[in-house]
Amino acid sequence: MSMVISEWQLDVKLNCALQNAQRTDFALYIALLSPAVDESAQFFTPDALQQSAPSNLYQQLGVAPPRSYAQTEDDVVQMLRHSEAFAQGSLAQLKLAAYLNPPPLARYDDKQRIADDVWQNLSLHSRRRLQHTTPEKPQASPADLYEVLQQIHGVEAA
């Protein structure tokens, strides 16, 4: 007998045992099932069906796939069309154009990006830390150090 993982492999046996009040058979079938919850029938969904169904649904209904919230290169042309619709027509024509081709909701789609007004209010040290840059350290020269030490000793001797 092969290993029984989910209820689908038992076909109607589990259901018949439950309906006919056959407790021993029902207990046996339940004991044969895998104890792993993620292998049960509720969680078994083929990956191929999940990926193909939404794309077919978009094609069947003629709906465009969802767009990102950030501005793209195509949005500049689209916003020019919106401004032309407002200039030629009225607010109603602009609303119609915006409903048919919605404008972007955000300029950038980066969670790590800091808003420009916040960036302008940061200190230079905070900006440097956020950019992960370190200032260049001057190279120490032993000859320069020797000259400084001679000047100090010359001042003390005088």
Image (spheres, rainbow, N blue to C red):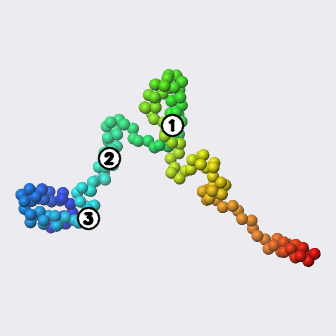
Residue where numbered disc 3 is placed: 36
Bin the neighbour count of mark 2 within 10 Å (Cα to Cα): few under 14, some 14-19, many 20 and up.
few
Give the residue type that dot 3 points to.
Ala
Bin the neighbour count of mark 3 within 10 Å (Cα to Cα): few under 14, some 14-19, many 20 and up.
few
Bin the neighbour count of mark 1 within 10 Å (Cα to Cα): few under 14, some 14-19, many 20 and up.
some
Q: Is 54 situated above or below 123?
A: above
Q: In the drawing, does residue 93 fall left or right of residue 125?
A: left
Residue where numbered disc 2 is placed: 52
Which callout, 2 or 3, points to the residue nearer the camera? 3
User: Helix, strand, or loop for circle 1?
Assistant: helix
Cα distance between the residues tagged 1 and 2: 28 Å
Give the residue type that dot 2 points to.
Ser
Asked if labels 3 and 2 touch by Cβ distance under 8 angstroms, the answer is no
Residue where numbered disc 1 is placed: 75
- Image coords of residue 97 (percent x, y): 46, 29
- Image coords of residue 21 (percent x, y): 7, 59
Which of the two discs, 1 and 3, labels the residue nearer the N terminus? 3
Which of the two discs, 1 and 2, labels the residue nearer the N terminus? 2
Asked if labels 2 and 1 touch by Cβ distance under 8 angstroms, the answer is no
Instruction: Look at 51% across and 51% down and name the residue there.
Output: 111
